[in-house]
Amino acid sequence: MKATATRPKITVTGDGRGVVGHAGARLLADLADATGLTSTFSRALAGLRLRRSGHDPGRIAVDLAITLADGGEAIADLAVLRDQAGLFGQVASDPTAWRLLSQVDETLLAGLRAARAEAREVAWAQRAETRGDLPQPTVAGQSVHGLVLDIDATIVICHSEKESATRTWKKTFGYHPLLCFLDNTGEALAGLLREGRAGSNTTTDHITVLDQALAQIPDAYRHGTPILLRSDSAGSSHGFLAHIRGLREQHLDIRFSVGAAITEPVREAIRAAAGWVPAVDTGGDLREHAEVCEITGLFDATGWPEGTRFLVRRERPHPGAQLTLFDTIEGWRHQVVATDTPPGNGSIQRLEARHRAHARVEDRIRNGKNTGFGRFPSRIFAINQAWLQLALTGIDLLAWTQNLLLDGDLAAAEPKKLRYRLLHVAARLTRTARRTTLAIAAGWPWTDALTTAFSRLAVLPRPAG
């Protein structure tokens, strides 16, 4: 048996000089400046600045967003930035940050959303100039042309009394925010903080989040690119789908793909359906024991927008699957998709697989909960609303970093991996000849990736003015 080598013996002291932690988070700070996010936030919050010598409110908001992107969970985690002034500059105190959040009302919240949209337009322009078009989502081995928006709600459990935190439909206690992500890039376009008892399929909330998400998309893309809106059955209310149809009358090329409830007429249509074809998996290969069929016209679709098609997928249930009585009798697990994508724009297998890719939003939400909106800091609802906007901003900063500055696995990595490999790296800060140098360890496996990212950041085209 080969003996396990012992670790080298060390002596620990606390007198290191020039050493900084979370050095990679400086990449996020510089990217916020390069996309104009810091300046747009400063303009949006300019009315909160009481004196010129005080902290810039926009800079405070950006520092909070960077803290959340870096894995912070509370305002107190600003200390990671504040205690390294040589790397991050002057960072506001915790009470100053609290005071800022407490002053953000609905008007300023709208200003922050507009500022995010302005910075996003710059980031997308930088992407187009340096790397070409935005990434296209891949479904069943083929790319989906255009922009793909995913709307979904989640429950954020609160462990203390908070304003508007209530009992949820899952019999927990907390909030029930509704969110919209862009599948192409992973950006968090919009989010609406709601009380825990808010309905899953509330039409007005879905309309609000979709409109806010569309407002985040630069004009050239919003009016010149096909847009697909995906949602589970919570987004299938007839009022919401009518709103989407109305947007097309405003010259937006937007279509929907949503889950549909399996009612008794739908069950009868499934029983009468013929022409089942094998379903495909995420790679485009045929999926064993799964079939797809179109049931458009086999039941009364009154109330649905004209041209809506209905696709049903059935598959043999896996062990532990929760089945309805209908599924148990038929021996299949069924799911129905409603879409207004017209015939001739892909096979029914591909359209159904395209909808199933909506499941990626669950990963976006899971990562988002680890990037700020999994824990809200205040008993006051308005403060938590502002916190949600900063969490969405932090998610955007990570997405822009990946889409503008990183390659390979890191460009698709989840936030936890980015933090572990890049953002939390230690480095030495030195000053010679009026120049400050951040020296990352030569032996760190991802040093080249981080230094390359900084080099790419330095040559990004900057917004004018």
Image (cartoon, rainbow, N blue to C red):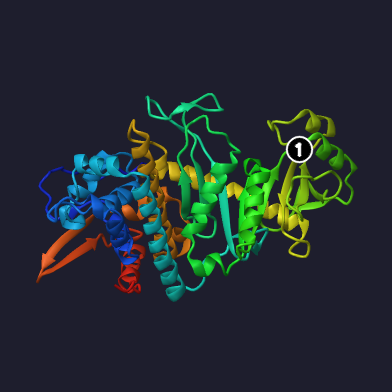
SS under mark 1: loop
The residue that appears at 32% across and 43% down in the rendered structure is 72
User: Which of 198 and 452 lies nearest the eye of the viewer?
Assistant: 198
Q: Amino acid at mark 1?
A: Ile
Q: Residue 264 at what x, y percent from top left?
A: 82, 34
Other-residue count near label 1 (Cα within 10 Å), few / some / many at <14 / 14–19 / ≥20: some
Q: Residue 159 at what x, y percent from top left?
A: 39, 26
Q: Residue 270 at what x, y percent from top left?
A: 84, 42
The residue that appears at 37% across and 45% down in the rendered structure is 106
The residue that appears at 48% across and 39% down in the rendered structure is 177
User: Which of 26 and 445 lies nearest the eye of the viewer?
Assistant: 26
458 relative to 154 in the view: left or right = left
Vertical side of 435 occupied by 354: above or below: above
User: Which of 51 and 13 lies nearest the eye of the viewer?
Assistant: 51
The image quadrant that residue 344 belongs to is bottom right
Q: Name the residue that disc number 1 marks.
A: 262
The residue that appears at 54% across and 24% down in the rendered structure is 171
448 relative to 86 in the view: left or right = right
- Report the quarter where the N terminus lies: top left
Vertical side of 254 occupied by 236: above or below: above
Vertical side of 258 occupied by 442: above or below: below
Q: Residue 386 at what x, y percent from top left?
A: 36, 44
169 relative to 130 in the view: left or right = right
- Report the quarter where the C terminus lies: bottom left
